[in-house]
Image: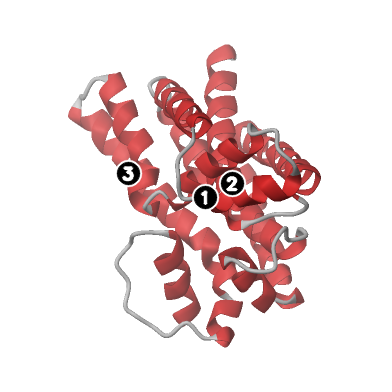
Amino acid sequence: MRALIIAFAMYSRVPVPRVPWNDRDMKYALCFFPAVGAGLGACFWLAFRLLVWSGIPDMARAVLLAALPVLYTGGIHLDGYLDTQDAVHSYADRQERLQILKDPHVGAFAVIYGIVYGLLAAGLLSVMDEGTAGPVASGFVYARILSAIAAVRFPKAKKDGTLRAFSDRAGGHVLSVLSGELAAFAAGLLFLFGAAGAVVLVTGLLVFAWYHHLAVKTFGGTTGDLAGYFVCEAELWILAVVVLSSWILR
């Protein structure tokens, strides 16, 4: 329970009791990262249903739904996304890029790509319907399963930082739990959504492969900011591919 509370306290703004953050409990916190995504996915789906029932215009509904993940997480993943865009588009050497990730100042590329991200999310959400809302909501869980696996398996770019603190405490048994969660999620997704579930799974894996390439080649490994970047990218790409493929196949 303490590991579950730590996961929600770190990666969401859901009110939870205060617990001490010791090594034993932090070791299992990554196992509950997907539970944070499940909570977000449930809130997203319920909000979509409520907004549809209320008759609010499509674009207003889309903007509210686009804001929901930021409000739920407190923007922790979006912060990493923006920092990563600044670092990648600096075209500097590896060490300077890592320094840019730590810089608290916001650069031009963070602003530019943050605006583009918000516009894309809102535009896609404006055409999301009841048939695609479920698969899109599942992306919040899937992104966090893959992100947690990457935190354990990918090389680390730095010897310190929050991601390093969590991953260093996680052993092979944590990876086994995450692998089991991934298998159960994939089976449930295919059972519930069929072809749309397969689209979610393939899209997530492709973004995951790109994340590994970017992290290792550009930064020498992953960091907390890069993990946030991946979560945002995976959520957006799953939204885009699910909604657009459904639209094309109508």
Q: Could you tell me the amino acid type at mark 3?
A: Leu
Label for residue 103?
A: 1
The reply, left or right, for residue 42 in relation to residue 89 is left
Who comes first in sequence, dot 3 or dot 2? 3
| Residue 227 horizontal/vertical position (percent) | 60, 52
Query: Do labels 2 and 1 touch, CB within 8 Å?
Result: yes
Front-most of 50 and 170?
170
Residue 249 quadrant: top right
The residue pinned by badge 3 equals 46
User: Is residue 139 visible to the viewer in this orientation of the structure?
Assistant: no
What's the residue at 39%, 83% (across, down)? 19
What's the residue at 61%, 78% (across, down)? 27
Given this view, does label 1 or label 3 mark the residue nearer the observer?
1
The residue carrying pointer 1 sits among few (fewer than 14), some (14 to 19) or many (20 or more) residues within 10 Å by Cα, namely few
| Residue 228 horizontal/vertical position (percent) | 55, 49
Disc 2 to disc 1, how far (Cα)? 5 Å
Q: Could you tell me the amino acid type at mark 1?
A: Asp
The residue pinned by badge 2 equals 100
Residue 190 quadrant: top right
Q: Could you tell me the amino acid type at mark 2?
A: Ile
Who comes first in sequence, dot 1 or dot 3? 3
Tell me if residue 161 comes above or below residue 60 in the rendering. below
